[in-house]
Structure formats: C-alpha cells, structure tokens
Image: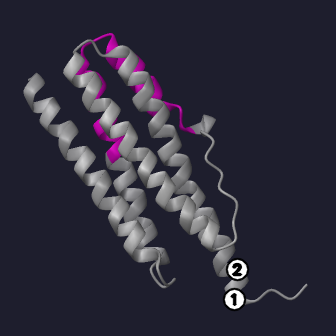
C-alpha cells in the first residue's frame, strides 16, 4: 500500500481532533455530575451554561472531522474518569471544591488545545477553530475562577 504524506497527516489530524472531542465529552459528563452535586441554584445555572458551551466546541470540532473525511468519536473515555471523581469527592466538601475540580479540568483542556495548535496549524482552516475553542475554554475557566473567588 502506498501511503502519501497527506494521508498520514489527515489520519493524525483526525486522531488529534477526536482526542479533543473525547476531552470535551468527558468534561460535559463532568459538568453533568457537578450540576447534580452542587447546592446553589446560581451555580447550577452557571454549570449548565458552561456545559452548553462545551457542546458548541464539540460541534465545531465535528465539522472539522467531517470536512477531512473522518468519523466523529464523541464517546467518553473511561481512562479520563479522574475529573469526574474529583467532582464527586469535592461535593463531599463544598460547592467550591466541585468548581475547583472543573477549573482544573478546563486548565488541562487549554493545554491540550495549545499542544494541538502547535502541532496542527499547518492544515488550512484548522487554526481558527482551535484558537476559537481554546479561547472559549479559557473564558469558561475564567468564569469558574470567579465562582471560586466568590466562594472564598
């Protein structure tokens, strides 16, 4: 079988994009868990908004995967259960501990986007979506930081 540079690049691209989609799917599940755990109604609403924002990021990534001929894999990854467990254990302490767990998970997602941007920007049309999603993730992280500050 003859493998071209373009084919290899697309396969790596699809793997990296689906890794980001997995991370978002895990965070969406984590936000759902967090919404069930927190007591403050305002915080529940905030977490719902942030969860919906995650879903928008997944839609943008799904469009990229589709444009490059791939199949979206948006299932959660059992290996990424740690953030969900932090939320559950945090709920035993306070709403603030739950929010801090989400903040940490969002920080890891920012790192994943930074790595993806550094590795994949040579593919046309990809950089703008990755940058947009990274900024969206940073905004969510900022909103969570505000909630943490209010809890202290």
- Is 2 placed above or below 30 here? below
Q: Quadrant of the C terminus?
A: top left
Question: Is the magenta region chiefly helix, strand or loop?
Answer: helix
Identify the residue shown where x is 37% and y is 65%.
114
90 magenta-colored: yes
Q: Quadrant of residue 79?
A: top right
Question: The N terminus lies in which quarter of the figure?
Answer: bottom right
Would you identify the image quadrant in which residue 100 lies?
top left
Question: Label 1: how many residues lie within 10 Å, few (<14), some (14-19) or many (20+)?
Answer: few
| Residue projecting furthest to the right | 1
Secondary element under disc 2, as helix, strand or loop, is helix
75 and 84: which is toward the camera = 75
Q: Secondary structure at mark 1?
A: helix
Q: Which mark is residue 8?
A: 2
Q: Position of residue 98 (x, y in %)?
A: 30, 24
Determine contact: label 2, label 1, CB under 8 Å: yes
Colour pattern:
one colour
Which residue is denoted by mark 1 in the rendering? 5
- Above or below for 37 versus 48: above
Relative to the observer, which residue lies in front, 69 or 80?
A: 69
Q: Position of residue 50 (x, y in %)?
A: 32, 39
Q: Which stretch appears magenta?
A: 80-106
């Amino acid at each position: 079988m003859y493998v071209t540079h373009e084919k290899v690049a697309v396969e790596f691209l699809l793997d990296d994009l689906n890794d980001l989609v997995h991370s978002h799917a895990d965070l969406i599940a984590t936000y759902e868990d967090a919404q069930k755990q927190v007591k403050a109604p305002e915080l529940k609403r905030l977490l719902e908004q942030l969860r919906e924002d995650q879903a928008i990021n997944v839609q943008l990534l799904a469009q990229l995967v589709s444009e490059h001929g791939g199949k979206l894999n948006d299932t959660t990854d059992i290996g990424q259960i740690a953030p969900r467990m932090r939320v559950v254990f945090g709920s035993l302490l306070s709403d603030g501990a739950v929010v801090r767990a989400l903040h940490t998970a969002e920080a890891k997602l920012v790192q994943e986007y930074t790595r993806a941007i550094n590795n994949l920007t040579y593919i046309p049309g990809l950089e703008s979506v990755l940058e947009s999603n990274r900024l969206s993730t940073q905004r969510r992280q900022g909103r969570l930081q505000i909630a943490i500050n209010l809890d202290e």
